[in-house]
């Protein structure tokens, strides 16, 4: 019995029960019927009570084969119908689950009943839907991790290349000074240059380490007054702009609230402000203001071509018109901005302006 399919198993169980009932019922009739008392009426309305055991026994024996045959036929038909009614929905669920095992997105248990089998079908559908959602989420997570690992590998390769040049230059300078080769005998002239290169390397290493830790610690967002925060962030850059004869205008509402992780947001905005001040010539202006729910940072400068804008967010990328490594640029500013704003799921745009010519950085809050 254990190896039988569901339909024949239900059929045999049902048939056995019905045959047992039929046999017991007919056995009781065969045994008890002859014991019955029959009341016969005569024309004179005289009731005579007689025992007709032999008569009843012969009648039952004649009727018993026909009754058993009819009962057997009814039992078979009822067992077939009952087995089919129970087994068919389960077979459909089984066929659907086989498709689900193959991760067929169109698989579905189409059972339209409100009993336990219908509940089972609905539970299977819900479970499969949750499974597909989980698989899709894991696929997205896997792609994100793969992209992140690829980005880290590219970043490390770029960082090693960036560090290699100043380290090689510093090493060659010190070696020539030790050997006393030509102009390098003038220690007083080249030691300050060596110190400057060491400070430059220290700054680059610090930026690289800070950048590598951007995604390690997730700061929870909280309600913050953006106007107050921006006023604090802009204060040092206003002083720098004033020292370089740059007009720094700040136009913010009295209060503007948003839910943000303060640390990452502050660092991203600081990098944007630093770039805006650094790439603005004396006599021109930098503007910071709110436009609806967007923070806008504009600076007057030569507009950057669109093909260059896309590459500005790559680590250590420096266009021809930007500052060189020696003048302080390390090519990580906008890369850090992109990493932080992307991790916060905050949309941003960096586009050139035609009138007045310059660049505009927009952060949608």
Image (spheres, grey):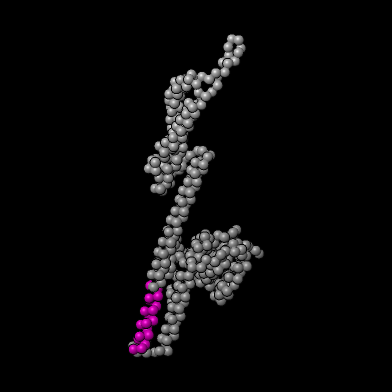
Percent x, y for residue 271? 52, 69
**Quarter of the rendering containing residue 1:** top left
- Please name the residue shown 60% across and 61% down the image: 258
Q: Is residue 74 above or below residue 346?
A: above
- Looking at the rendered image, the quarter that the C terminus falls into is bottom right
Of 159 and 85, nearer the camera is 85
- Please name the residue shown 40% across and 64% down the image: 150
**Quarter of the rendering containing residue 232:** bottom right
- Please name the residue shown 41% across and 38% down the image: 9
Percent x, y for residue 312? 45, 65
358 relative to 150 in the view: left or right: right
User: Per the image, is 243 magenta?
Assistant: no
Q: What span is colored magenta in the figure?
A: 161-179
**Quarter of the rendering containing residue 265:** bottom right
Chief SS of the magenta region:
helix
Q: What residue occupies the far right of the structure in this picture?
A: 254
């Amino acid at each position: 019995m254990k190896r039988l399919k569901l339909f024949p198993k239900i059929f045999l169980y049902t048939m056995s029960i019905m045959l047992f009932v039929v046999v017991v019922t007919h056995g009781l009739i065969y045994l008890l019927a002859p014991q019955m008392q029959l009341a016969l009426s005569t024309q004179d309305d005289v009731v005579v009570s007689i025992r007709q055991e032999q008569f009843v026994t012969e009648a039952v024996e004649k009727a018993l084969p026909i009754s058993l045959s009819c009962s057997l036929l009814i039992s078979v038909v009822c067992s077939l119908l009952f087995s089919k009614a129970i087994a068919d929905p389960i077979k459909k669920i089984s066929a659907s689950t086989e498709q689900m095992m193959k991760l067929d997105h169109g698989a579905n248990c189409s059972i339209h009943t409100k009993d336990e089998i219908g509940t089972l079908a609905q539970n299977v559908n819900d479970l499969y839907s949750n499974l597909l959602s989980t698989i899709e989420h894991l696929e997205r997570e896997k792609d994100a991790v793969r992209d992140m690992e690829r980005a880290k590998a590219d970043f490390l390769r770029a960082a090693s290349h960036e560090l290699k040049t100043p380290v090689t230059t510093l090493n060659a300078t010190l070696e020539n000074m030790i050997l006393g080769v030509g102009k390098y005998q003038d220690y007083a002239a080249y030691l300050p240059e060596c110190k400057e290169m060491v400070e430059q390397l220290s700054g680059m290493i610090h930026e690289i380490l800070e950048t590598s830790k951007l995604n390690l610690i997730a700061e929870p967002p909280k309600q913050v007054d953006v106007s107050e925060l921006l006023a604090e962030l802009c204060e040092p850059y206003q002083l720098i702009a004033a020292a370089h004869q740059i007009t720094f205008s700040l136009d913010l509402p009295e209060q503007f609230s948003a839910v943000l992780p303060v640390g990452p947001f502050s660092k991203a905005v600081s990098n944007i402000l630093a770039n805006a001040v650094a790439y603005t010539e004396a006599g021109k202006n930098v503007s910071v203001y709110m436009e609806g729910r967007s923070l806008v940072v504009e600076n007057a400068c030569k507009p950057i071509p669109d093909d260059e804008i896309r590459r500005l967010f790559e680590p250590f990328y420096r266009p021809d018109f930007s500052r060189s490594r020696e003048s302080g640029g390390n090519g990580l500013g906008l890369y850090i901005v992109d990493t932080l704003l992307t991790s916060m799921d905050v949309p941003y745009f960096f586009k050139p302006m035609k009138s007045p010519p310059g660049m505009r950085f927009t952060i949608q809050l």
